[in-house]
Amino acid sequence: MAHFYQRGNTLQVRVNNLRMSTGIRIPPSATFSPSAQLFFGKGVVGINAEIDRHRQFISECDNLSDYGIFTQPIIVIDPISCDIVNICRQFMAGFRDGSILTVKQLKAKTKTISTYQFAVNTLINYATPQPKIDLLDYNLSHVKDVNKKRQIASRWQKWFDGMVKSMDGNKVNTKATVMQIIAAIVSHYEKEFFLQLPPIPRVKSVDNPIVVLPQEFIRQFLNDGLYSSLTGELRYTWEVCATIMVTTMRIGDATGLKWDNLSDRADGLFLEKWNGKTGAYTSMILPRQLADVYRSNMSAHGHIFSPEADLYEWIPRLFKTYESLNRSVSVSNLNLKGELEMTTLPLWEWVKPHMLRKTAITSMLANGVSEQHVKFASGHSDKSQAFNKYRGFVERNFNNQLNTYYENFS
């Protein structure tokens, strides 16, 4: 059965394991519908008739090599390589050069590419000693016999179960992320080649405990005057950490902040930055203390931050100086064997850039900032499950409405 699809400005056709160009150039005024297998728009009657002519020829010809002569000019017929290792490598090449975009049709960030590459490397390491797995061998769209479908799906499941087993040295959430990424890559080519594949087994992730700094810490951090005594790397570290705790930004957005992202008005310094993850613009006034630091750095260095430093090295050094953060905090989490394990550390050792972001979000919610405003600032969608976890954390730990409800009984 022939499936036609658009690639660039040319119409291509897939027949079994062959992908061929029809030689048909698609006019700008026409839109091709993969589901209807027809063009829509102005002047498409002739081009749709041409598709029917191609479909008829393919159904009647004994040797598809003749199709190259039929298309005029001659088109070379190339077998599709759907070996899973090859398509993962091909995907990563496209992800890097921007020819393959994210779900939101944006170019992938460096961190996202790195995470995908880790997942692909994990698959390659597992697949290397295994028999090759070709997606076309597991295509169910042309299989009519139910038992045959079950057999194919069972082999598919067994291969990927083996991959999950090979990751036993990783934490549960790492396994979950890897399998989710591989499923996304396979789905990309499943759609491109009009395949119907069995589902890739998923690993259920677990919610990591939410650890945040005390509500009042952000105020203390901005007002205690410590910044003026800092030099070099500690100054840069303070500036980035303050930015995250004030704006809820992710570390990549915070460190990439520039004066062009700010608007200096009579009533204060405002942050106006596009969120690369959600595609929304953030506009918010910055506290005077942080605004003054940005202005001072612009005068001294020509940019809002002091010279860069390794944040992961200097964050512990900075936060260790706060006496209130030297108390021990115990957190239960799953170890590599999937067993609950208690870890006890001073609170300053739990401080990481994303923990500061969580502190900012939960502090805003606890102090009455509307959920919609916090979502807009932090880049969470309306249906974000992560945001719902932060909201539940605030309700349990900061401003439980049931407590107020029961207090009114007395």
Image: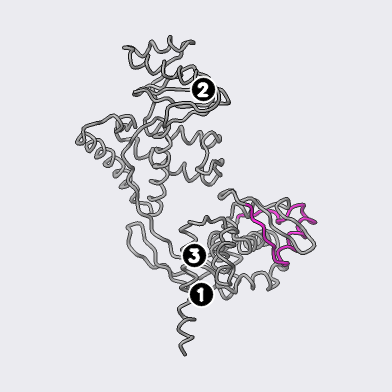
Q: Could you classify mark 2 by the number of other residues whose Cα lies within 10 Å: few (under 14), some (14-19), or many (20 or more)?
A: some
Of discs 2 and 3, which sits in the foreground? 2
Q: Is residue 183 left or right of residue 137?
A: right
Dot 1 amino acid type: Phe
Q: Nearer the viewer, residue 157 or 42?
A: 42
Q: Position of 338 compared to 391: left or right?
A: left
Q: Kindly indicate whether the residue at mark 3 contacts the one at mark 2 (C-beta within 8 angstroms).
A: no
Tag shown at residue 398: 1
Q: Specify start and end residues of the magenta stretch as a single range.
A: 281-310
Q: Position of residue 363 (x, y in %)?
A: 57, 69
SS for tag 3? Answer: helix
Res. 390 mark: 3
Identity of the residue drawn at 48% across and 10% down: 72
Q: Quadrant of residue 196?
A: top left
Give the crowd class for mark 1: few <14, some 14-19, many >=20 residues within 10 Å.
some
The residues tagged by marks 1 and 2 sit, at their Cα atoms, a distance apart of 63 Å
The percent coordinates of residue 52 (x first, y second) are 41, 18
Horizontal and vertical percent for residue 203? 35, 51
Which residue is at a point 77% across and 54% down the rendered structure image? 301
Residue 44 circle label: 2
Q: Earlier in the sequence, mark 1 or mark 2?
A: 2
Q: Position of residue 94 (x, y in %)?
A: 51, 34
Indicate the quadrant containing the N terminus: top left, top right, bottom left or bottom right: top left
Cα–Cα gap, marks 3 and 1: 11 Å
Q: Is 246 one of the magenta-colored residues?
A: no
Q: Where 386 falls versus 343 (above or below)?
A: above
| Cα distance between the residues tagged 2 and 3 | 53 Å
